Amino acid sequence: MEFVELRRPSVKRVLIVEDDELNMKLIHDLLEVHGYTTITTPEGSAALGLARANRPHLILMDLQLPDVSGFDAVRQLKREESTRAIPVVAVTAFAMGGDARKALASGCDAYVAKPFIVRNFLALVESFIGTSSSELR
């Protein structure tokens, strides 16, 4: 009898950096129900270490964090060779005229203002990292 190894596509991992518990739960639950695996932290200072250790496919970064600003956390991620290529999306309540430009200048690859439209948010996630493996089954 011959055995054939079936390879499952890897699960897409998303690092969520968000200090507001309700926003964290919303984003976490939304991504998990769509088959993505999430890694979460409320601290910008933990983002670099978690990104190094878990190699997420995408990072969702709040810009208003209590310990380190999201802008500074993104700059750290983009300076580090091992995390530079990971796309970072600012997901923030900063919604003034120049905020999107400031987020992109700090190294973010996209900007989403809270509250967001779920369908558009999921489409943005998919545009960066594709469909989750559980949706492919």
Image: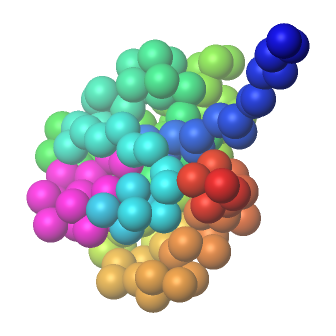
In the rendered view, would you say 56 is above or below 63? Answer: above
Question: Magenta stretch?
Answer: 16-28
- At x 83%, y 21%, the residue is 4
Looking at the image, residue 129 sits to the left or right of residue 21; the answer is right
Along the line of sight, which residue is nearer the eye, 93 or 6? 6
In the rendered view, would you say 16 is above or below 62? Answer: above
Q: Is residue 76 visible?
A: yes
- At x 30%, y 41%, the residue is 40
Along the line of sight, which residue is nearer the eye, 92 or 23? 23
Q: Quadrant of the N terminus?
A: top right
Looking at the image, residue 52 sits to the left or right of residue 82; the answer is left
Question: Is 31 contained in the magenta span?
Answer: no
Q: Main secondary structure of the magenta part?
A: helix
- At x 57%, y 53%, the residue is 134
Q: Which quadrant holds residue 131? A: bottom right
- At x 49%, y 55%, the residue is 35
Q: Position of residue 9 (x, y in %)?
A: 71, 39
Q: Position of residue 117 (x, y in %)?
A: 45, 87
Q: Position of residue 20 (x, y in %)?
A: 16, 60
Looking at the image, residue 89 sits to the left or right of residue 61; the answer is right
Q: Quadrant of the C terminus?
A: bottom right
Q: Is residue 107 visible?
A: no
